[in-house]
Image (cartoon, rainbow, N blue to C red):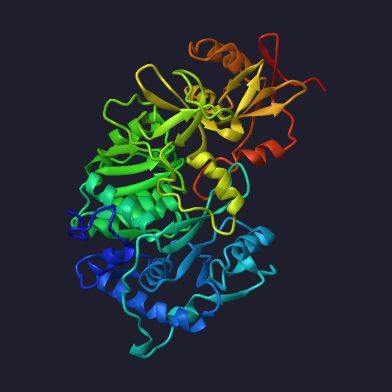
């Protein structure tokens, strides 16, 4: 039973979930400035919506840019949008200069809201629109007449624009509807039995879909309290879980790895934490995290667009995403025909768009994503003989080596088996014919070229064509705000390799 009573994933909206919480005083949001019960949360949002309406031009799309960390103001702004038909645009706080201004313009923002922490991000930048301190919307007294009611909305009403991570290209603004958030929230709340006694931890950035779909919406659907952290901190996670009695947390990328790097404490396994849900954590990190904190870690597969979702089953191998079930298919990117077991292809939704509602102001990108009437993820995978899907990288990571198509994902996972290698990014470097493989590693100083050859030779599932042609050892990998490696930055870097492969050995490049 969710906090929304009889609402189902197909009928729920964020507005309806909020209606069920409008009079709740014993649960709410824990944040750096105190505690806001749900009743106050909703009433503050109604007042906020009225103040925003006063500033918006009714002849233009009611789009408001939000350039904030995970603050209570950000949380209230999204609710204001949900109950009054506004559209919040989550602007990535790691974007800078003209790129940031272009995002806001592409999303048709009428103005951008900042606070004392983020105002400096737009200093000297021609945003092409007003930039307002969020305190102007929240501060001071306002008559009750400014407060708006909670509207009844349709599931497909636009609620938020969220930009893709931009790991392989420029970010695109994904149209996120009431249904995008509410359907996922209800489904996950039911799946993990999230209810009034739970506390959902929210530290992934709210301008990204993982926080909104796998965290915030789950809390609303279950009627659970939220522990809101301004930004992710590995040490802060351990402290907050204990302080607030967190029972559920979401993640994307490498947070589990960073948390595991903190010093283990005797009471880590005695917290209330029971479910950690996300994607892109390694099998080793999932296992270690579950044992350390005495919880269940569930790693799924999905994207900001919401076109394909793959769910792990209890019998899914540690290094697989989950079983291949209809309507998900793996097809040849060129022909669109399903590939045989063991062959790498693109993951698609053969039934249509799923929860994908298109990109805003980008019909060409939307059409490309939906070519042939099916949703194309741009992700590569292969299915084993038992019917389980394995991730093989992004379509942009597809490499052609000695006449064979290879994905980067399997190579990266094999490299991470080496205890001296902490992070790995693999990509193809075009040469006269096909590609050569480059591996960029963050590793211990103790890893030698000889050790590396010995390690690769011992990996029975690493084919000879999958050995890196060159290796670059670095201090860190470039990451997005959601801890995904930005390979395009690595490709654009002209740093010489640490080792090159010659006659089965790795040696420094000849000067």
Q: Against 209, is 23 above or below? A: below
Of residues 62 and 440, which is closer to you in this image? Answer: 62
Tag count in the figure? 0
* For residue 394, side relative to residue 34 (left or right): right
Q: Residue furthest right?
A: 511
Taking the spot 20% from the left edge, 48% from the top edge, the residue there is: 193
* For residue 259, side relative to residue 510 (left or right): left
Taking the spot 54% from the left edge, 80% from the top edge, the residue there is: 57
* For residue 436, side relative to residue 2 (left or right): right
Q: Is residue 76 visible?
A: yes
Of residues 274 and 319, which is closer to you in this image? Answer: 319
Taking the spot 52% from the left edge, 44% from the top edge, the residue there is: 370
Q: Is residue 240 visible?
A: no
In the rendered image, residue 310, in percent from the top left (x then y), is placed at: 37, 36
Q: Residue furthest top?
A: 503
Question: Residue 491's quadrant in the figure?
Answer: top right
Q: Against 105, is 358 above or below? A: above
Taking the spot 46% from the left edge, 41% from the top edge, the residue there is: 253
The C terminus lies in quadrant: top right
In the rendered image, residue 138, in percent from the top left (x then y), is placed at: 43, 79
In the rendered image, residue 4, in percent from the top left (x then y), is placed at: 22, 60
Question: Residue 93's quadrant in the figure?
Answer: bottom right
In the rendered image, residue 62, in percent from the top left (x then y), is placed at: 50, 73
Q: Against 229, is 471 above or below? A: above
Of residues 243 and 143, which is closer to you in this image? Answer: 143
């Amino acid at each position: 039973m969710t906090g929304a009573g009889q609402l189902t994933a197909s009928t729920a909206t964020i507005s309806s979930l909020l209606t069920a919480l409008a009079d709740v005083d014993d649960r709410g949001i824990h944040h750096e400035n105190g505690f806001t019960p749900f009743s106050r949360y909703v009433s503050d949002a109604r007042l906020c919506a009225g103040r925003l309406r006063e500033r918006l031009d009714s002849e233009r799309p009611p789009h408001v840019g939000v350039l904030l960390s995970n603050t209570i103001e950000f949380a209230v702004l999204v609710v204001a949008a949900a109950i009054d038909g506004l559209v919040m645009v989550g602007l990535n706080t790691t974007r800078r200069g003209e790129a940031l201004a272009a995002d806001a313009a592409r999303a048709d923002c009428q103005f951008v809201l900042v606070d004392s922490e983020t105002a400096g991000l737009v200093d000297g930048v021609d945003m092409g629109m007003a930039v307002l301190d969020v305190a102007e919307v929240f501060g001071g007294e306002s008559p009750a007449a400014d407060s708006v009611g909670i509207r009844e909305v349709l599931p497909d009403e636009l609620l938020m624009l969220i930009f893709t991570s931009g790991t392989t290209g420029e970010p695109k603004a994904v149209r996120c509807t009431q249904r995008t958030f509410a359907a996922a929230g209800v489904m996950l709340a039911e799946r993990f039995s999230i209810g009034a006694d739970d506390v959902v931890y929210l530290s992934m950035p709210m301008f990204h879909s993982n926080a909104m779909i796998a965290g915030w919406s789950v809390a609303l659907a279950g009627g659970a309290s939220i522990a809101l952290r301004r930004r992710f901190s590995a040490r802060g996670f351990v402290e907050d879980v204990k302080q607030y009695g967190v029972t559920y947390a979401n993640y994307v990328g490498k947070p589990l790895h960073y948390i595991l790097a903190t010093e283990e404490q005797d009471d880590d396994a005695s917290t209330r934490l029971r479910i950690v849900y996300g994607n892109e954590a390694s099998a080793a990190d999932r296992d270690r995290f579950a044992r350390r904190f005495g919880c269940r870690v569930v790693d799924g597969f999905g994207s900001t667009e919401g076109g394909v979702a793959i769910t792990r089953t209890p019998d899914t191998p540690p290094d697989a995403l989950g079983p291949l079930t209809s309507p998900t298919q793996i097809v040849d990117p060129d022909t669109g025909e399903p590939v045989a077991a063991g062959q790498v292809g693109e993951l698609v939704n053969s039934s249509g768009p799923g929860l994908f509602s298109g990109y805003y102001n980008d019909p060409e990108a939307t059409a490309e994503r939906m070519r042939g009437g099916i949703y194309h993820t741009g992700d590569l995978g292969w299915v084993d003989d038992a019917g389980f899907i394995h991730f093989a990288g992004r379509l942009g990571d597809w490499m052609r080596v000695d006449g064979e198509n290879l994905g980067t994902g399997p190579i990266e996972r094999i490299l991470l088996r080496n205890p001296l290698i902490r992070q790995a990014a693999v990509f193809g470097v075009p040469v006269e014919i096909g590609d050569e493989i480059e591996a960029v590693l963050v590793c211990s100083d103790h890893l030698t070229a000889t050790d590396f050859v010995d390690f690769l030779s011992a990996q029975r599932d690493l084919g000879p064509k999958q050995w890196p042609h060159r290796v670059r050892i670095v201090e860190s990998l470039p990451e997005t705000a959601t801890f995904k490696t930005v390979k395009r930055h690595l490709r654009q870097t002209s740093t010489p390799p640490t080792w090159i492969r010659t006659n089965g050995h790795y040696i420094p490049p000849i000067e």
